[in-house]
Image (cartoon, rainbow, N blue to C red):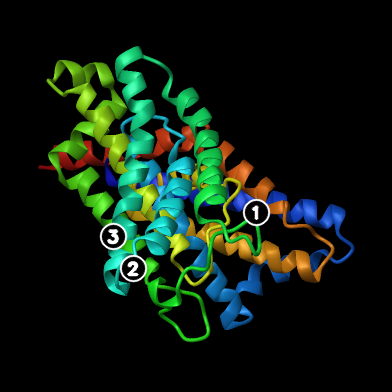
């Protein structure tokens, strides 16, 4: 991708965000009796206290995991939505390991996170195998599989690790088995480091390895990749296994964080769906998922604060997200500007060549 195209994509993304925010602000002016206060609270609320800003960082951690996993799957044009279920199963496995295996603190955390990732990989491999064996739609099979993850986790919770004193959650996770907080008086935990490492490693895999190149080539043109000798079966399996592994690790890390005291996920948390937004903003590049996750977490935290102190509900964020996605995926959005930019660059290069 040339430097001009990269600049255009960045400008296009920022312009889409600006339009979405302006539309959202316009709606706030229409429905609120105190629109300026609401907008000011939305924008500045996360900076008003350490606790508020910590909420932003805490919220972005699971988004980085699922966003990175989906970036890898979507780069191969495998529209697998089972990252939601993989995250859920990862949390369940982490809870079972912490409660049942009786390992020492450091070993328990490592084993729980690793097994959570393996469980997530196995889970997302199911749609991949169905695709390879039966040519079924990965989109449909993965979407339906998420509900299987939800009810399976609920079954394990209620029949094996449920605390009868509360009835809808597991026994308490021992404090010594949870990930340590990194900043005093916040719940920002060591999972942030793991999440950032996953994003960086995901980038190096996709853009600095042969297998990653094969994934991206297949995603751009599967027929060309096939004729170039790329194993499509390998691409499908690797992309789904790795994407599911990262999502599963995210679920395990989230459950062991200071945010949760027990496993009580009887419904899907939505991080897999959020991952599609993160992936869209990051343009399938794992290196940008932390920035995309930070933006989304900041917006949601600000909206939550705004809903508590003004008469505007936090659903305004859903409108902003929807407009951003519509503009980013719309191929014709600013297409004329892009053509002029490429033509201008080509003319400049031609003149430079003639001058030599």
- 172 to the left or right of 115: right
User: Could you say where residue 240 lies in the image, as x and y percent from the top left?
Assistant: 32, 35
**Percent x, y of residue 323:** 63, 42
Q: What kind of element bears circle 3?
A: helix
**54 or 338: which is nearer to us?**
54
Residue 258 in the image, given as x and y percentages of width and height: 49, 72
Q: Is residue 227 above or below residue 312?
A: above
Which of the 4 quarters of the picture holds residue 36? bottom right
Locate residue 157, reporting x and y percent: 53, 50
**Sequence-wise first label, 3 or 1:** 1
Asked if the residues shown at circle 3 and circle 1 are in contact, with their CB atoms under 8 angstroms apart, the answer is no
Looking at the image, is mark 3 or mark 1 nearer the viewer?
A: 3
Residue 193 has which mark? Answer: 2
Q: Secondary structure at mark 2?
A: helix
Q: Residues within 10 Å of mark 3 (few under 14, many from 20)?
A: some
Q: Earlier in the sequence, mark 3 or mark 2?
A: 3
C-alpha span from label 2 to label 1: 30 Å
Residue most extreme to the left: 356
Measured in 3D between alpha carbons, the distance from the residue under mark 3 to the one under mark 2, in whole angstroms, is 17 Å
Name the residue beneath numbered marker 1. Answer: 21
Tell me the SS state at disc 1: helix
Q: Along the horizontal axis of the image, is 107 left or right of 16?
A: left
Of the residues under marks 2 and 1, which one precedes in the sequence?
1
- Whether residue 75 is visible here, answered yes or no, is yes
Q: CA distance from mark 3 to mark 1?
A: 43 Å
Residue pictured at 79% horizontal, 56% vertical: 28
At x 44%, y 46%, the residue is 89
Residue matched to label 3: 111
In the picture, which quadrant includes the C terminus?
top left
């Amino acid at each position: 991708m040339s430097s001009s195209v990269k600049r255009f994509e960045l400008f296009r993304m920022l312009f889409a965000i600006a339009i979405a925010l302006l539309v959202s602000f316009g709606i706030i002016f229409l429905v609120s009796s105190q629109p300026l206060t609401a907008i000011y609270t939305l924008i500045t609320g996360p900076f008003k206290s350490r606790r508020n800003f910590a909420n932003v960082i805490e919220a972005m951690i699971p988004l980085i995991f699922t966003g990175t996993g989906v970036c890898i799957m979507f780069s191969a044009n495998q529209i697998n939505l089972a990252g939601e279920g993989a995250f859920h199963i990862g949390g369940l496995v982490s809870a079972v390991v912490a409660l049942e295996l009786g390992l020492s603190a450091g070993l328990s955390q490592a084993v729980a996170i690793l097994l959570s990732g393996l469980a997530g990989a196995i889970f997302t491999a199911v749609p991949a195998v169905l695709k390879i064996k039966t040519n079924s739609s990965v989109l449909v099979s993965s979407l339906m599989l998420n509900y299987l993850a939800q009810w399976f986790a609920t079954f394990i919770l209620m029949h094996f690790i449920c605390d009868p004193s509360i009835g809808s959650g597991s026994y308490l996770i021992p404090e010594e088995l949870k990930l340590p907080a990194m900043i005093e008086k916040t719940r920002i935990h060591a999972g942030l480091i793991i999440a950032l490492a996953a994003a960086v490693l995901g980038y190096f895999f996709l853009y600095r390895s042969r297998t990653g190149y094969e994934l991206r080539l297949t995603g751009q043109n599967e027929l060309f990749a096939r004729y170039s000798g790329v194993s499509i079966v390998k691409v499908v399996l690797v992309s789904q296994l790795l994407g599911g592994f990262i999502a599963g690790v995210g679920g395990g890390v989230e459950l062991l964080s200071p945010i949760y005291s027990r496993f009580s996920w009887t419904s899907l948390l939505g991080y897999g769906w959020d991952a599609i937004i993160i992936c869209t903003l990051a343009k399938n590049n794992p290196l940008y998922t932390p920035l995309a996750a930070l933006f989304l977490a900041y917006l949601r935290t600000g909206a939550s604060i705004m809903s508590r102190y003004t008469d505007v509900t936090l659903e305004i964020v859903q409108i902003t997200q929807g407009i951003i996605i519509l503009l980013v995926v719309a191929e014709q959005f600013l297409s004329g500007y892009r053509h002029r930019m490429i033509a201008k660059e080509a003319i400049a290069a031609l003149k430079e060549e003639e001058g030599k």
